[in-house]
Amino acid sequence: MSNSEHRSDFAMEYLHQFSRTNRAIYLCSLVALLGAAVALPLVSLNVSTQASGTLRPLAEKTEIRPLVAGTITRQYVRENQAVRKGDTLLVLQSAAMQAHLDLNQRQQTEKEAFVQDLEVLVRGMAAPAGGLRTQLYGQQAAQFSYQQQLLRNQLSKSARELATNRRLYAGRVIARIELEEKAFAYRKLLDEIRVQAATQRSQWQADLNTHRADLAELRGQRQKLQQEQRLFALTAPVNGTVQQIAGKYAGSYVQAGELLGQISPDGALLAECYVSPKDIGYMHVGMPVRFQVDAFDYNQWGLVEGQVTDVARDFVLVNEQQPVFKVRCRLQRPYLELQNGYRGSLRKGMTVRGRFLLARRTLWQLLFDKADNWFNPTQNGAA
């Protein structure tokens, strides 16, 4: 066989092999394309959008502001200190408030003494053997006793004169009119004694009622002053952590309403995400969310499941120029966990990336949407 014939046979054999390879590739490609076309309406994918956010407590931060002005006498908290509801944060003092309380106490003591003395006088119409507590009513009791004694002495004298006149009248020594004059004088003294006692009792009873009313008013004023005094002790309204303490120390003067710090409340965490206006229309309560926490490598720690609980109705400006909507989400658990069981706790202030599941779309729908974006003149014109 010549060389030319040998080369011709080799070429024919090579072309034959090459043709079979092409046919196999062609058939495989055709099958793959047909399989892909069949799978387009069958295979579904999750369509999601992402939004950044932060972890924060369910309740808002509470500001520490005094309702009254005063001087700080004691301070019990420091920056980043955990506090419980009702714990005293700092105590203020006001000289005017203390002066009002001292005056009220002195007035109450005086009124109580008046009431005690008058109760004794109204009941017995005389000072006890040990005397009275107040000089005022001690003098009045002594004056009343002296006047009563004078009247009783006069009554005793009148009684003797009346008895004498009765004997003289019986002996027909004096006229009847003289006897009646002595009897009238005697009865007049009796009436004066009774009237004086009744008048004095009425006066003391009136004073007693007045002092009781004044004492009740003073006690009410003291309760009000004590309630106001409690405003000088600032207490924690919630459990939480003290933040941004102002540079105030014992001896510093603070104004009413001055910001002295904040309390970041404890409790359940939520994720607050900032969703762009182009995606806010898809958001609704109950939408599932998956969160990637920036502080933990999601390849090792995984994601946190959540659910949308609130969608803002109005936008806010971020960096004073970019409008966003706040979307709040509940977390299914407050931690991430490694495969070995070690848990990493989620904390307030951690940044997250929320992946909001918008819908499940088939490959065919996604391809059609993409083609529609390319060829739809309305879409292109809007772009």
Image (cartoon, rainbow, N blue to C red):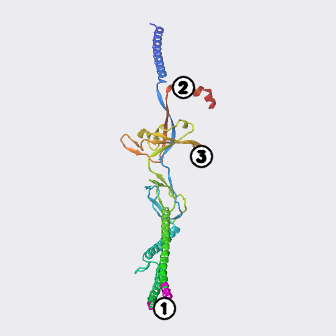
Q: Position of residue 1 (x, y in %)?
A: 44, 7
Three-letter amino acid code of the residue under disc 1: Ile
Task: Select label 3 or label 1 by which is in front.
Answer: 1
Magenta residues, start to end: 170-184
Q: Magenta includes 179? A: yes
Mark 1 — residue? 174
Give the class, few, some or many, for how many residues have Cα within 10 Å of label 2's Cα (few <14, many ≥20): few
256 left or right, relative to 155: right
Callout 3 secondary element: loop
Q: Vertical placement of 217 versus 284: above or below? A: below
224 or 99: nearer the viewer = 224
Callout 1 secondary element: loop
Mark 2 and mark 1: span between their CA atoms?
Answer: 146 Å
| Residue 310 seen in the figure | yes
| Residue 102 seen in the figure | no
Disc nearer the start of the sequence (3/2): 3
Q: In which quadrant of the rendered image does the C terminus lie?
A: top right
Mark 3 and mark 1: span between their CA atoms?
Answer: 120 Å
Mark 3 — residue? 320
Three-letter amino acid code of the residue under disc 3: Glu
